[in-house]
Amino acid sequence: MGKTRRVYPAEFKREAVGLTKQPNASVEGVARDLGISSSALHKWVRAEKEAGALAFPGQGKQGLSAEQAEIERLKKELALVKEEREILKKATAYFAKESR
């Protein structure tokens, strides 16, 4: 069997990245001290540089940024409006046929 994938909380990732910023600290040394792979820590450092505070959103709805949550809300609203439009088209066609 393969290894199970470990999931680290966002706070742990932030603290690990913070440790790499200390004087005389290397990513490899910090990773070794924390018992994680250096490649994972390199990935976290890169993610923190690119996204800043939004680097480790987690999973599910709680991890969504404000923009991502707004996009989700708008997608749901768009689907509802499309469904309503289709119902109105069918109703219009039905009543147009009935009036003849």
Image (cartoon, grey):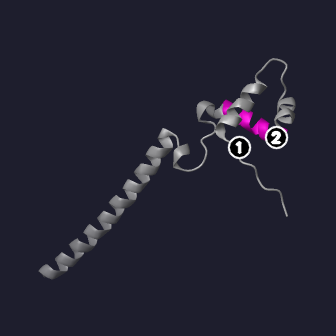
Residue that label 1 marks? 8
Q: Main secondary structure of the magenta part?
A: helix
The residue to which callout 2 is attached is 36
Specify whether 38 is left or right of 48.
right
- Tell me if residue 78 comes above or below residue 20 in the rendering: below
Quadrant where the image shows the C terminus = bottom left
**Residue 13 drawn at (x, y percent):** 70, 36
The quadrant holding residue 57 is top right
Q: Residue furthest top?
A: 23
Name the quadrant containing residue 97: bottom left
Q: Amino acid at mark 2?
A: Ile
- Magenta-drawn stretch contains 96: no
Nearer the observer, 27 or 79 = 27
Magenta stretch bounds: 37-49
Q: CA distance from mark 1 to mark 2?
A: 10 Å
From the image, which quarter does the N terminus lie in?
A: bottom right
Q: Residues within 10 Å of mark 2 (few under 14, many from 20)?
A: some
x, y percent for residue 53? 60, 31
